[in-house]
Every structure is written in C-alpha cells, then in structure tokens.
C-alpha cells in the first residue's frame, strides 16, 4: 500500500464590511514566517478535536479581537504549493459585518485593520499564501448574495432611503446603478423593504425629503424576485 502524504488543516476568514462607500476586508499583518510582514486573512491551524467553524471563530478572535460574529463556509483550498511549509489545506469562511468594528493585532498578528478590497485585489502580491484568491472568491460570494437575498439591508441602518440602499449595491458590485431601474426592481421585490411612512431631508438640506424604508424581515432571506447586476 502506498504511503500517504501528511496533510495539515487550517481555516481562514474573509470578513467584509462597508465603510465610506467602499467594500473593505479585515486583514492582519503576519508576525512570523512564511510571509512575515505580509497582509493575510485571519486564520490558522485547526486543533485536533476542533470543529471548523469553532476554529475559524477562535482564530478570528485570537488575531484581531473580533468576537460575536457569524461565519459561513466559503470553499476549500488545497492546491499543492499554496503553503511553503508543506501540504496544507485551508477551509475558508466568509463573514459580513454591517460596520467596521474595532480590531487590534494579537497573537500571530502584528497588526489588524480594515482595507479597501479594490486596492487589495489590485496588488495580490502584497497578500500571503493564496489569500488574494480566497478574498476574491469571498467578494464574489457576497456580490451574488446581494442578487438573490436581502443581505443589502444588513449594511444600512434601521431606516434608510432607497438612495442609501442603492449605494450598498453600487459599493459591493463596484458599478453605478440607474436610480429608476433600481427603484422599479426594489418595488417588484415585495419581501425586501417596506415603507415606514416617514421621510427625511438630505444632509445638505436641499431637494425633496426622501421616503424612508425598513427591512421587510429581521433576518437575511431569499428574495422572491432577484435584483440582478445585469
């Protein structure tokens, strides 16, 4: 019987949020080799008797101080040579936060902070391992979820205008959206938002007051009519 190669198991977490109109990712600066000083997604090795989700949450807390978030499995990355230490397979997870919570570098991380996704993916050589690929996949997962679920309402306040909601889609998708078409699609999607009957002036105080809405449900759910990018 042929001998089998020893394989180590790790987890990585792509935590994403919106800030100042741009999609941002939580990154750490590695303290140790390999890739010492490079930006990386929070993550590390799974303990022998540890569940994958528990490992992802533990590593996220140990390296950034972030706690109380929800993660979902993204996919598995196991290309030979992805880790110079040997044969290492990583199970990546994605988390979506409504705002960039305070973080700090701990444990294996010299520093931790939120970085604009566009700039990270424009320079994949700045990231350790294959984390540029993992981050790109996580971003595409969130972009797709905006089409078919109510995730966009997670990024706005309790009440919001349709202009503010459109800004979420534009920031995550990285494109401009026609306001009229967007309003039509939102109104076709009956289980996305509901009107509050209230309105508010723009920050400049100019123009007509904008009608305010709230999320149709408290939890993220599938939509009866998708809001597609096309």
Image (spheres, rainbow, N blue to C red):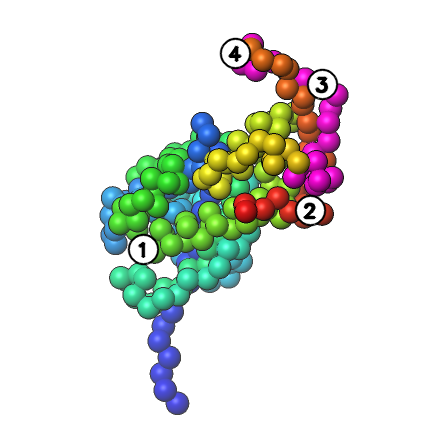
198 inside magenta stretch: yes
Identified at 40% across, 46% down, the residue is 42
Q: Is residue 193 above or below residue 142?
A: above
Percent of width and height locating residue 10: 41, 58
User: Would you name the residue on which mark 2 appears?
Assistant: 225
Identified at 58% across, 13% down, the residue is 207
Front residue of 9/21: it is: 21
Label 3: how many residues lie within 10 Å, few (<14), some (14-19) or many (20+)? few
| SS label for mark 3 | strand
Q: Can residue 21 be seen in this view?
A: yes
Please tell me which of labels 4 and 3 falls first in the chain: 3
- The reply to whether discs 1 and 4 touch (Cβ–Cβ < 8 Å) is no
User: Would you name the residue on which mark 1 appears?
Assistant: 129
Badge nearest the viewer, 3 or 2? 2
Q: Give the range drawn in magenta.
A: 185-205
Percent of width and height locating residue 206: 56, 11
Please tell me which of labels 2 and 4 falls first in the chain: 4
Q: Distance between the residues labelled 4 and 3?
A: 18 Å
| Mark number, residue 198 | 3
Q: How far apart are marks 3 and 2 (CA)?
A: 25 Å
């Amino acid at each position: 019987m042929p001998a089998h190669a020893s394989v180590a198991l790790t987890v990585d977490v792509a935590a994403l949020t919106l800030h100042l109109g741009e999609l941002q990712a939580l990154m750490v600066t590695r303290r140790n080799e390999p890739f010492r000083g490079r930006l990386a997604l929070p993550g590390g090795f799974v303990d022998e008797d540890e569940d994958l989700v528990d490992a992802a949450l533990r590593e996220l807390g140990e390296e950034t101080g972030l706690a109380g978030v929800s993660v979902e499995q993204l996919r598995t990355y196991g290309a030979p040579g992805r880790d110079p230490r040997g044969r290492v397979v990583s199970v990546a997870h994605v988390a979506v936060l409504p705002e960039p919570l305070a973080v700090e570098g701990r444990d294996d991380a010299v520093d931790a902070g939120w970085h604009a996704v566009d700039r990270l993916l424009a320079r994949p050589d700045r990231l350790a391992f294959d984390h540029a690929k993992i981050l790109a996949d996580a971003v595409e997962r969130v972009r797709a979820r905006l089409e078919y679920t109510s995730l966009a309402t997670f990024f706005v306040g309790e009440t919001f205008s349709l202009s503010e909601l459109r800004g979420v889609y534009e920031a995550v998708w990285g494109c401009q959206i026609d306001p009229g078409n967007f309003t039509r699609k939102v109104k076709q999607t009956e289980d996305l938002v509901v009107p509050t009957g209230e309105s508010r002036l723009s920050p400049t105080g100019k123009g007509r007051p904008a009608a305010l809405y709230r999320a149709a449900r408290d939890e993220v759910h599938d939509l009866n009519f998708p809001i597609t990018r096309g």
